[in-house]
């Protein structure tokens, strides 16, 4: 269902429902489905000939022991065959607010095996439904009655929660006990995800540009667990050299290529633990996790669908990837490289423990690359290290090469400890055109060495909302020189910024370094809270604008140290003063009842908005990422 826009040009999103809180309870009675990892796969083959595994993530999922009894997941009205495990999402810790999005929200996942589903027609999308104690999800629905997820695109739309039965192989890998001469069944698994030549293991490269002798679209790879150093093509865990999926059509050799961990035996609630520690090859290449196709392979015709490019439709979930400390610049835990369309990275733990004597890691990130219709959902990206003087190894790096990124959604990620770069960056200096339609929302971004949120060169349209940005090394929000290519292309609403200028003590909190856009506005910044941390010294200020026209409205500005002074003069509807967080010392940025931010925002970005905790609100909107008085259904 497309979402309309308000007269101000902002999306009107009819979202009702949400959930959160510690332990996955959320506080509301109805379950909430945030998203799933795999939207298509086989319903036969695999373990006991019962098809692929799928994970559903959400709140208020109930108890694992009750699934199949009082709790049920159905696809197309038919209950899935069996339930495997329930778990906290990656990065979950001791619970309680202030340690990251997972501890704040308590989101969980449940993995199941789909089974035959009553022998439906292949290639036809089926509704996913969930009942917990007889209660259905509180998610919004589309025009066909399917539930919609909460990962909102810049145009206000969201994907429907469906599963499409589709043909494809299911391959099992056991890196400790497998053998590459085996057929890849669960009883006789392969040994490697990929061997160093690329022509062995599960992820088998094609031998030529038009060949179909490599991994087929629609394949699901299941990792039986363990923590070993992997050495695939060029030292990556998996080099997607002439490997790629397609959109699912129901035809043989169609569909996304999917990789996840083994979820344990049916009913055991004991998923495998999978850690990839990519190795460096003899030439000093690689050292990263999944690496997409280079520009040459991204321009070849994919023989399976006749479209341009390999390295498309790759879906990865529920694994941990630790890049090599001396990895090359492309050695990210996840790197789409060029034209990585339809990637979906869900609930992965991604880190890069660079050391001072390693190679010069620049223009890199925990997740890097470009494509269209890409989703980064619920990942824990942390300890991304690099050359501090370069400051070019980021949490996420959304860029351009052959084409510019378009339609990327960054939702529900925890990005923490980025020691040589930004939290989330959009930047293009290679491809013609500009980066478009980037949606960054409901993320926790903490302890970056440079900017928390960075909008850089040739970004045409991007929206950032409901994020919490803590302890930025330079600006909390930055717009770089030559960044915004159209008027009002960047919108920055209802975020909470707590602490900036931690490293470069002269940096402003909000910084526009000069842009191309013109009237009526180059950027639009409203309903945010900008609050400095007690004890931060320096010569920082609130806002620096060096060109273009920037609109500010209804923001809250507070520097307990008194250095930045009162609110900026160009925010005539903003206010100066303590936002009265519940407990900033423990990073609980919810608002007290007496907070001046309550009911003091302007027309909301979302007509029926939800906040950082995915609570819904009616009436006047507050400032910041949290909405006091918002409720779960």
Image (cartoon, grey):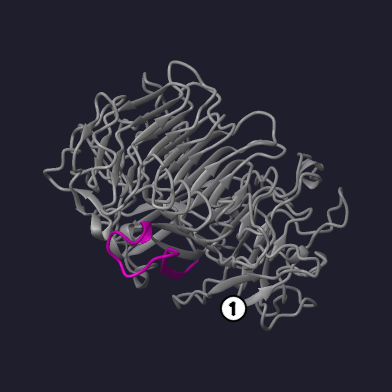
Could you tell whether 500 is left or right of 430 in the image? Answer: left
Left of 382 or right of it: where is 476? left
How many numbered dots are placed on residues in this image?
A: 1
Is residue 114 in view? Answer: no
Q: Residue furthest front?
A: 539
Which is more toward the observer, 595 or 111?
A: 595
For the residue pair 126 and 149, the one nearer the viewer reads as 149
Q: Position of residue 579 (x, y in %)?
A: 20, 43
Question: Which residue appears at 43% of the width and 52% of the height?
Answer: 503
Q: Is residue 13 left or right of residue 44?
A: left
The N terminus lies in quadrant: top left
Q: Label 1 neighbourhood size at 10 Å, few (<14), some (14-19), many (20+)? A: some
Position of 280 relative to 406 (above/below): below
Of residues 566 and 94, which is closer to you in this image? Answer: 566
- Residue 179 in the figure: left or right of residue 258: right
Q: Which residue is mark 1?
A: 226
Q: From what the image shows, is residue 620 above or below residue 47?
A: above
* Residue 565, quarter of picture: top left
Magenta stretch contains residue 90 = yes
Q: Which residues are magenta?
A: 81-102
Residue 599: image location, x then y, percent: 18, 34
Q: Is residue 575 visible?
A: yes
Seen from this angle, which residue lies furthest bottom?
A: 177
Q: Position of residue 483 (x, y in %)?
A: 55, 31
Q: Is residue 345 magenta?
A: no
Q: Residue at x 15, y 42 (%)?
A: 595
Asked which secondary structure carries label 1, the reply is strand
Q: Position of residue 563 (x, y in %)?
A: 27, 42
Residue farthest toward the top in the current orientation of the protein: 519
């Amino acid at each position: 269902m497309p979402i309309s826009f308000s007269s101000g040009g902002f999306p009107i999103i009819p979202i009702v429902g949400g959930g959160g809180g510690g332990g996955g309870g959320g506080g509301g009675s109805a379950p909430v489905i945030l998203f799933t990892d795999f939207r298509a796969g086989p319903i036969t083959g695999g373990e006991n000939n019962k098809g692929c595994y799928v994970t559903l993530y959400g709140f208020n999922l109930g108890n694992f022991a009750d699934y199949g009894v009082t709790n049920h997941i159905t696809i197309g009205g038919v209950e899935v065959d069996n339930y495997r495990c329930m778990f906290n999402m990656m990065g979950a810790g001791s619970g309680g607010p202030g340690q990251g999005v997972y501890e704040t929200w308590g989101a969980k996942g449940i993995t199941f095996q789909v089974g035959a589903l009553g022998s439906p027609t292949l290639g036809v999308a089926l509704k996913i439904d969930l009942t917990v104690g007889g209660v259905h999800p509180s998610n919004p629905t589309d025009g066909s009655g399917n539930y919609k997820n909460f990962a909102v695109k810049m145009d206000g739309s969201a994907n429907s929660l469906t599963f499409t039965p589709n043909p494809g192989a299911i391959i099992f890998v056991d890196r400790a006990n497998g053998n590459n001469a085996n057929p890849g069944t669960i009883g006789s698994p392969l040994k490697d995800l990929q061997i160093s030549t690329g022509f062995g293991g599960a992820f088998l490269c094609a031998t030529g540009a038009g060949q179909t002798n490599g991994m087929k679209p629609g394949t699901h790879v299941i990792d039986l667990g363990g923590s070993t150093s992997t050495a695939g093509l060029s030292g990556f865990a998996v080099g997607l050299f002439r490997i790629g999926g397609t959109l699912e059509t129901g035809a043989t050799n169609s569909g996304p290529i999917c990789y996840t961990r083994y979820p344990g035996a049916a009913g055991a609630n004991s998923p495998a633990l999978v850690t990839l520690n990519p190795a460096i090859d003899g030439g000093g290449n690689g050292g990263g996790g999944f690496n997409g196709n280079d520009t040459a392979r991204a321009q070849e015709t994919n023989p399976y669908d006749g479209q341009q490019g390999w390295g498309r439709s790759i879906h990865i979930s529920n694994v941990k990837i630790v890049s090599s400390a001396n990895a090359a610049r492309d050695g990210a835990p996840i790197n789409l490289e060029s034209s990585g369309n339809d990637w979906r990275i869900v609930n992965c733990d991604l880190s890069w423990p660079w050391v001072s004597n390693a190679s010069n890691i620049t223009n890199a990130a925990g997740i890097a690359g470009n494509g269209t219709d890409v989703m980064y959902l619920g990942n824990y990206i942390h300890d991304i290290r690099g050359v501090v003087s370069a400051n070019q190894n980021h949490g996420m790096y959304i860029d351009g090469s052959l084409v510019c990124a378009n339609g990327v959604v960054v939702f529900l990620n925890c990005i923490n400890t980025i020691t040589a770069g930004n939290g989330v960056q959009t930047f293009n200096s290679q491809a013609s055109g500009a980066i478009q339609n980037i949606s960054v929302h409901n993320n926790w971004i903490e302890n970056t060495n440079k900017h928390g949120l960075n909008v850089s060169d040739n970004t045409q349209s991007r929206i950032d909302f409901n994020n919490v940005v803590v302890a930025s090394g330079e600006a909390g929000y930055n717009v770089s020189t030559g960044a915004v290519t159209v008027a009002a292309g960047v919108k920055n609403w209802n975020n909470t910024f707590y602490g900036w200028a931690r490293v470069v003590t002269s940096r402003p909190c909000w910084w526009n370094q000069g842009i191309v856009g013109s009237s009526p506005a180059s950027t639009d910044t409203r309903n945010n809270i900008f609050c400095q941390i007690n004890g931060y010294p320096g010569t920082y200020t609130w806002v620096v604008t060096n060109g273009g026209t920037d609109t500010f409205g209804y923001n809250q500005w507070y520097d307990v140290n008194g250095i930045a002074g009162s609110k900026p003069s160009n925010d005539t509807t903003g206010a100066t003063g303590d936002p009265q967080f519940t407990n900033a010392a423990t990073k609980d940025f919810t608002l007290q009842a007496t907070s001046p931010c309550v009911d003091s925002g302007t027309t909301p970005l979302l007509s029926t908005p939800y906040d950082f905790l995915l609570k819904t609100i009616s009436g006047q909107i507050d400032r910041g990422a949290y909405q006091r008085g918002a409720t779960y259904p």
